Amino acid sequence: MKIAIAGATGRMGKMLIESVLNTPDAQLVGALEHTSSPQLGEDAGAFLGKKTGVMISADVAQALAGAQFLIDFTRPEGTMAHLAVAEKTGTKMIIGTTGLSTEQIAGLKKVSTKLAIVFAPNMSVGVNATFKLLEIAAKMLNQGYDIEIIEAHHRHKVDAPSGTALKMGEVIAEALGEKLDDVAVYAREGHTGERKEGSIGFATIRGGDIVGDHTVLFAGDGERIEISHKSSSRQSYAQGSLRAARFLQTQNTGLYDMQDVLGLRK
Ligand SMILES: NC(=O)C1=CN([C@@H]2O[C@H](COP(=O)(O)OP(=O)(O)OC[C@H]3O[C@@H](n4cnc5c(N)ncnc54)[C@H](OP(=O)(O)O)[C@@H]3O)[C@@H](O)[C@H]2O)C=CC1
Ligand SMILES: O=C(O)C1=N[C@H](C(=O)O)C[C@H](O)C1
């Protein structure tokens, strides 16, 4: 698999480069950063003390010219700019970037009629298995349990709630026959009044180097159930992204997520 990485000097970008270099069926062929990155022109493996021969570049068309896949963990505006070029070069995309707007997601859907894309807020197998557990729990605890989603991430994260927390909310709302937009409560402050029955609350923690923790609390009378996932390394996201690339080898068009990649879709 000939792979280019966008956001090559970011937390995920570096983990992805290391994973690609350590994966026998993968080859690093491009490394992208934005035009003001001080690391443009450096070898993409320099942070590992390795020479890959792939230089960090801001020339998207050139970086994608020889790439079958672009793995993109950047920012929504970066992802959309890369998508426009990938559409032209026919480079399939694996997108982990979170915080995309409804319009930006509609843009992905449009391009996916011509290009195969995996887009998922969390590439880890564990989190995607947790989505299934939440679906079962929400159906079983559909009366008398208040649902709260608590997520914690490192101090550098720029979007909230996390894409994973929002997806957890969507999975639970759908299992309950609701739309997340109709039942979500994203903030509480001051005199909020009592908790609204049937709402799904979100709480966000930011601090230190927390890789990513998510807990869904089902709080009833006299008991609580908690379903938690905790990431201790970004490796699971990188390995999931490589599984997504392998999955895309046999897809020409379509918008997929990790449930498709892992065969978890019902
Ligand atoms: N789906 C999943 O499994 C996961 C998703 N994520 C998501 O991935 C994204 C990146 O996370 P993380 O690696 O921690 O973030 P970082 O900030 O460490 O990395 C982002 C990289 O993208 C670059 N970048 C920023 N803006 C642009 C732009 N407009 N165009 C091109 N490149 C740009 C940054 O450069 P610079 O630093 O110079 O600004 C940086 O190198 C986030 O949205 C995060 O939520 C993270 C982990 C797992
Ligand atoms: O920014 C991060 O770090 C992460 N972002 C993703 C999200 O928003 O859900 C996935 C993971 O939790 C790490």
Image (spheres, rainbow, N blue to C red):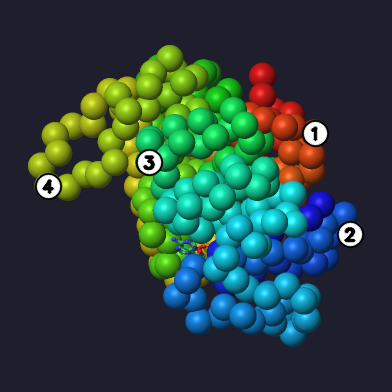
Name the amino acid type tagged 3: Ser
Report the residue at 52% width, 31% height from top: 109
Q: Nearer the viewer, residue 105 or 141?
A: 105
Report the residue at 59% width, 42% height from top: 87
Instruction: Find out if the beta carbon at label 4 lies less than 8 Å from the nearest ligand 2 atom.
Output: no
Q: Residues within 10 Å of mark 2 (few under 14, many from 20)?
A: few
Q: Which mark is residue 250?
A: 1
* Residue, disc 2: 24
Q: What's the distance in space between the residues labelled 3 and 1, CA to CA?
A: 29 Å
Residue found at the very far right of the displayed protein: 24
Name the amino acid type tagged 4: Gly
* Residue, disc 3: 101
Q: Quadrant of the C terminus?
A: top right
Q: What's the distance in space between the residues labelled 4 and 2, CA to CA?
A: 55 Å
**Sooner in the amino-acid sequence: mark 2 or mark 1:** 2
Q: What's the distance in space between the residues labelled 3 and 4, CA to CA?
A: 29 Å
